[in-house]
Amino acid sequence: MSPRTILKYGFRIRTRSGVIVENLSIYGKDEVEARRKLCQMYNDCEILESRCLPVSLGGRHAALSYEDVVDLIVAE
């Protein structure tokens, strides 16, 4: 069984109230899944920009933030 590839996507959005939110990072197997997760958290948002971010999970001493760890735990 091959390991599942998880990518990290960065988003810049406008919420339904008009607020711009930058640097949202969401893990997903592809961009479609990341966008789906984003739309679940921010209903009726407008995605202004999206990009694939490099994920560095190289070994035991890799630097991960708290948000990175939580995102990995909740990624399906």
Image (cartoon, rainbow, N blue to C red):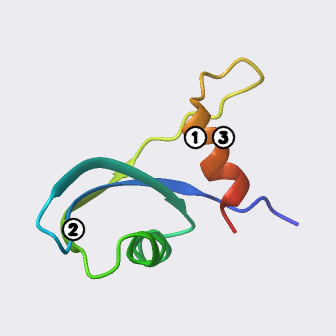
The tag on residue 28 is none
Q: Which residue position is annotated with label 2?
A: 15
The residue at the point 19 percent across, 75 percent down is 16
Quote the CA–CA distance across marks 2 and 1: 23 Å
Q: Secondary structure at mark 1?
A: helix
Residue 19, position as x, y percentages in the image: 15, 59
Label 2 or label 1, whichever comes before in sequence order? 2
Q: Which residue position is annotated with label 3?
A: 69
Where's the C terminus, which quadrant?
Answer: bottom right
Above or below 19: residue 70: above
Asked whether 30 or 19 is in front, the reply is: 19
Question: What's the amino acid at mark 1?
Answer: Asp
The residue at the point 66 percent across, 29 percent down is 58
Quote the CA–CA distance across marks 3 and 1: 4 Å
Quote the CA–CA distance across marks 3 and 2: 25 Å
Q: Residues within 10 Å of mark 3 (few under 14, many from 20)?
A: few
